[in-house]
Amino acid sequence: MKKLTILLIIVLGAFGLKAQTDVPKFTVSPSEVDALTEKVTITFDVTGSAVEGLTDVYIWAWAPSLSPSETLLDYDQGSASWGSISKNAKLDPVAGNPNKFKLSLPKTVTRNGVSVTFNNIAELFGVGDTPGKIKEFGFLLRSQDGSKQTPGDLKTKVSLLPLEFTPAYFRTFPAKVSNKDVVTAYLNLSLIESGEDQKLKIASKITATATLMTATGTTILAVDKIATSYTSEKEYAFTFLPEMLAAFPAGVSLKDVAKCKIEFSGEVSDQKGGVTTVKTKAFEFSFQSYE
């Protein structure tokens, strides 16, 4: 009987230790984000972790590449202190599920008596002007007094898409966007594809046509002759906000917009003084869905 009791104590102790070392599960929406992505939601499932059962769960987050490394949510002024975490670091509960909490951006808080809105991860870590400095951030979840916490040492972390871009014939920034985000489309004619009209290389007056479509590819609206600018990266670019591109037809709204198609065109003069219009192929991409 004594041996059985000891064995039971060992089993229960091992179970308790495992609960202390279990990391929380989490999801990021959208699934791929960079430091400037807006409308980001991170949802945490604390089931089986050291903070399961807590009504109030706080996040302690840090970016290894930064100094100071802690998120501005963790302290109101001065520097971060484990023993006095700010109320701003308290996660929002997920309705209907006591084991789930979330952090959503944009997030408005009061720091040192001033109202501040964090629109993206770069701003959350105080590097809104130099977002390329943050590549990833780690986090742990904890009680307010710090007596309970999930594992640290980057056991849980969020990796960010690089802000540096890979040169391409066509690209957008951000690489993935929702239909509510500002989009910039780029065309690099120095990387023109073999199947394209090579006269585009010498074309002038490059303009664009943007078409918004439903998930099935049905055209909602199209706007042509959009002016482009020539960037320092030798790309033609234009920026647009889908909901401001043009008036939507009756019975159609932004929620119906699922895809976008973009074409560029330019003018080429011939030896007789005539002008020919040349066009790129249609570049199509889907908008990311946010929760």
Image: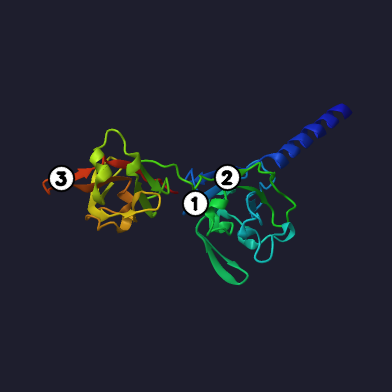
The reply, left or right, for residue 231 in relation to residue 115 is left
- What residue is shown with label 2? 158
- What residue is shown with label 1? 40
- What residue is shown with label 3? 270
Query: In this orientation, which residue lies closer to the viewer: 186 or 112?
Result: 186
Visible in this render: residue 246?
A: yes
- Residue positioned 26% across, 57% down in the render: 246
The reply, left or right, for residue 1 in relation to residue 210 is right
The vertical placement of 8 against 121, above or below, is: above
Visible in this render: residue 1?
A: no
Q: Are marks 3 and 1 in contact (CB under 8 Å)?
A: no
Residue furthest to the bottom in view is 113
Please rate how many residues cluster around mark 3, counting C-alpha atoms within 10 Å: few if below 14, some from 14 to 19, many from 20. few
Q: How is the image coloured?
A: rainbow
User: Which callout, 3 or 1, points at the residue further toward the start of the chain?
Assistant: 1
Please rate how many residues cluster around mark 2, counting C-alpha atoms within 10 Å: few if below 14, some from 14 to 19, many from 20. some
Marks 3 and 1 sit apart, C-alpha to C-alpha, by 50 Å
Marks 3 and 2 sit apart, C-alpha to C-alpha, by 54 Å
Quadrant position of the N terminus in the picture: top right
Q: Position of residue 271 (x, y in %)?
A: 14, 45
Q: Are marks 1 and 2 in contact (CB under 8 Å)?
A: no
Mark 3 vs mark 2: give the one in front. 3
